[in-house]
Amino acid sequence: MPTVEADLEPARRYGRAPLIPRYLWRWIGPLLGGLTAIVVAGGFLTAGETGPRQFERRIMDAVDSAHVSRRLMRLGMQFGAPRFFAAIVIALALWAAVRQSWPELIACASVPAAVLIVEQVLKPIVGRHYVNDVLCYPSGTATGVAAWTTLTWLLAMPAVRSEGLRLSLAICLAALAALTAFSTVGYHAHYPLDAVAGFATGIGIVLGWAAVIDLFTGAHRDRSLSRDAMPSDAA
């Protein structure tokens, strides 16, 4: 009997397979609202400021006193380095092209777009400066890594058949993005609120753009197509 994965192949080619798994789709509105609220609240709190708030200073002192390996933090920063970032985006685009899925290919644009929105829109609007007078809210590095890890998760879900592996992949990618956000603080490149907002912005923009694509294609109208269904569910 044909598997669910095989049934999804024609749907991918003609843009009818959903980017966002069905179980997440029902929560996408509240999730995007919560991520937006985090970014907006932090922006209001730090608008036009230079230097950390008192609670941020305590967090930064705690990070410094924790003696976290500099090598580990350096690794976290490398995940958001320009060359690595560009390589990941190209790899994701090639993966979508090989699968002949134009929605997935268009979704890849959300990753560089997330960083562009942060650098060109959000940072100037909020106007928060680090001690070296560089705009810092939200963190572009944390945004970029949260964006590409989120898209990687979305594109990988249909190819991972085991629920345990799906959960493991989600945890690993989330930990990787969190490590980068933590590293921006540990490396004294950003304040804690910058890192949290960057993390939320990257996830929110990718999920939001994927949701727009799914609405445009009407992917969730056809209940027989589910990117999160297991092959064993197929009759």
Image (cartoon, rainbow, N blue to C red):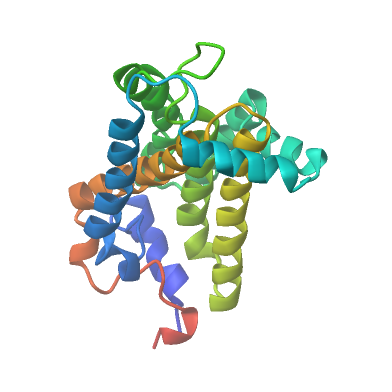
Q: Is residue 48 or residue 223 the one in the foreground?
A: 48
- In the current view of this chain or complex, which residue is farthest to the front? 54
Residue 74, percent across and down? 75, 35
Tell me where residue 178 appears, x and y as whole percent.
57, 49
Q: Is residue 30 left or right of residue 182?
A: left
Q: Quadrant of the N terminus?
A: bottom left
User: Splitting the image into 4 quarters, where does residue 220 fall?
Assistant: bottom left
The relative height of residue 126 versus residue 193 in the rendered view (above or below) is above
Kindly identify the residue that appears in the image at 38 percent across and 43 percent down: 206
Compared with 140, 167 (above or below) is below
Q: At x 45% / y 69%, what residue is drawn?
A: 6
Placement of the C terminus among the 4 image quadrants: bottom left
Nearer to me, 50 or 22: 50
Residue at 40% across, 47% down: 101
Q: Residue 198 is drawn in which quadrant?
A: top left
Q: Image quarter for residue 162?
A: bottom right
Q: Nearer the viewer, residue 176 or 165?
A: 176
Q: Position of residue 97 (x, y in %)?
A: 49, 41
Q: Residue furthest bottom?
A: 235
What residue is rendered at 81% in x and 39% in y? 71
